[in-house]
Amino acid sequence: MPIHKRSFDAFSNAILFYEDFGEHKNNWTRSIHASLQDQNFDEVPFRVPQLLEPSVLDEVGRLNGLTAEDIETYSYQLKGPVATLKWLQDMRKWATPVQRLNLAACLSATCRYHTAHNILEEVDYKALYTDQKVAYHITKFIIDNRLDRTSLHQSDFCKLKTIIETERVGPDRILDVSAQAIVWAIKADVIEPSLLDWFVKAGNSAAEKLSHTKSGREMIALSSFYRAYAMLPAAERNISDTRRYMELAEQYADEAGPDASEMSLRDARKTVLESKLKEMLYVVEDPEQARQAGKELISLDPNWSISYHELADVEISDGNVEEALRLFQKALSVGLPRLAYSQYMIGACLQVLGRADEAIDAFMKTLDMDGSNISAGISGLRLAESHSTENISFFKSYVEKWNYDGLLSPENRSMLG
Amino acid sequence: MIVTTPIIHILDIDHIQLDVANIEESYEFYNRVFGFEIKEVGIRAFVRWMIIGVPSKLYLCMHEFSDGRGVENKGLEITHFGILVQDFDNVRSQLHQHNVKLFPDYEVQYRSSRSVYFLDPNGYKVEISEHVGGGIDA
């Protein structure tokens, strides 16, 4: 049992123990705890906060003397909420289908995607009610997505279409499903165009039905749908239509009432701002408005490293590398997640600013955090060759190992010359 | 004309809901003494629950509240529930073999039936009656 007490770090405590305790608490850590504290595993949908990449377990492991597998398999001393979850996992032979379904959703919230996948496979699908079937396919889609099984998405969305066509599904759930279909059709081209069209129509029809709703939960569903829907004109650089739908997304997120959970309200407002930042940066190409959205994001949740990354991207696009460096340093100081990325980008900014020795030091620190960061290894090696020959062997040892393990892409090799 | 609303016809008792201090402890007790088996488990808002049962006879739904152990109930409460067993004559010695203390520590003789009482691990009083309804309908 490598650790027996809470970490100093709130993000680690959320992953390891489902607790909201420690330094740099943020909306995500709060939501991880609240998702388990406030929700009943007999009901769907089980609301989870932003689902992060599987490598988060490696990051948390490194900080706490564990491996990702230790975390996935709970090979550390358990107490509090996580012990209750582990109990359900161990006793799942007697758990009802909806309890298993929600257990899988809850585990995916802390990136235990492999375990979540295995548990979901044990769910007796035929025993699920309609709304539970919808939750099943959404949960399966999310887990497959994070495990890079994106080729399976089309099949799940086809099944969701059939359920919506043949059974009674509430308009708010149709909006949730349609939003996911649009996002992943645009982001990863994993939904066929005819199916995307069907969800766009289904989503619009559901949105019309709810257009005068006073329900906070339904308003959040509307916000989520319009945020996704705005991606369609955005992909064609149609500025006015993108803004029109983004305004609806903003309006519903702002006006959503207190009958929605605090977690849903926070997430809705935050995701709208994240989309607005991207809209202003890539569609409107207005860095000042993107910057404002980024600053608002940070003020909403000042200990969330990813928001600093997003604002730093705006600064880089606008040529303000000094400011981007400051933001990546701030991201590093608030910690997980994506700590190694913060450290690597500090190196990248320092390199652009011509501060070679500091950049080399930053790349070395990146590799100490994450020995698989190929970008840091290659950038560090090239910089060391021209500025600091005594550090060449440090970077070379990594690069040679990656080469031996077949991890270098042709692009990586060409960068090495 | 007087219109009377029809009564609701009860078929049988369905289940008894218990708050317990430790779900494993309670399951172990009812399983060891009466052969209750786990039927379903789950969680809601951090609270563990378990349904145990002797099929078609009796189900106990248990929710775990560890802070409740030993806390006195100051309001109204159900003070005990009663069960029937196959072999009442031997039940005292069987309870003794399971180290279950009677409460009170003697067999109670009612008008048309006998009863023994014991406390479960949470302090709930359970009555074992010789006859249905204490033989009251006989």
Image: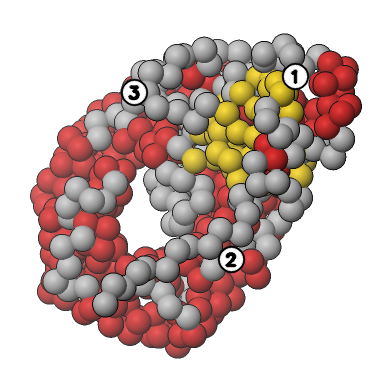
Are callouts 3 and 1 both on one chain?
Answer: no
Q: Secondary structure at mark 3?
A: loop
The location of residue B109, given as percent across then percent down, is: 71, 23
Q: Amino acid at mark 2?
A: Leu
Q: Secondary structure at mark 2?
A: loop
Q: Residue at x 21, y 33 (%)?
A: A323
Q: Amino acid at mark 1?
A: Glu
Q: On the picture, is B47 further left or further right than A33?
A: right
The location of residue B70, given as percent across then percent down, is: 52, 12
What residue is disc 2 on? A128
What's the distance in space between the residues labelled 1 and 2, CA to CA?
Answer: 49 Å
Do the CB atoms of the residues marked 3 and 2 lie less than 8 Å apart? no
Q: On the picture, is B73 further left or further right than B113?
A: left
Q: Residue at x 59, y 66 (%)?
A: A128
Colour style of the rendered protein structure: secondary structure
- Quadrant of the image for the N terminus of chain A? top right
Q: Secondary structure at mark 1?
A: loop
**Closer mark to the observer between disc 3 and disc 1:** 1
Are callouts 1 and 2 both on one chain?
Answer: no
Do the CB atoms of the residues marked 1 and 2 lie less than 8 Å apart? no
Can residue A301 be seen at all in this image of the molecule?
A: yes
What residue is disc 3 on? A24
Q: Residue at x 65, y 41 (%)?
A: B136
Crowding at label 3, few (<14), some or many (≥20) Cα neighbours within 10 Å? many
The location of residue A365, given as percent across then percent down, is: 49, 22
Q: On the picture, is A152 further left or further right than B95?
A: left
Can residue A80 be seen at all in this image of the molecule?
A: no
What residue is disc 1 on? B107
Q: Amino acid at mark 3?
A: His
Specify the quadrant of the image occupied by residue A245.
bottom left
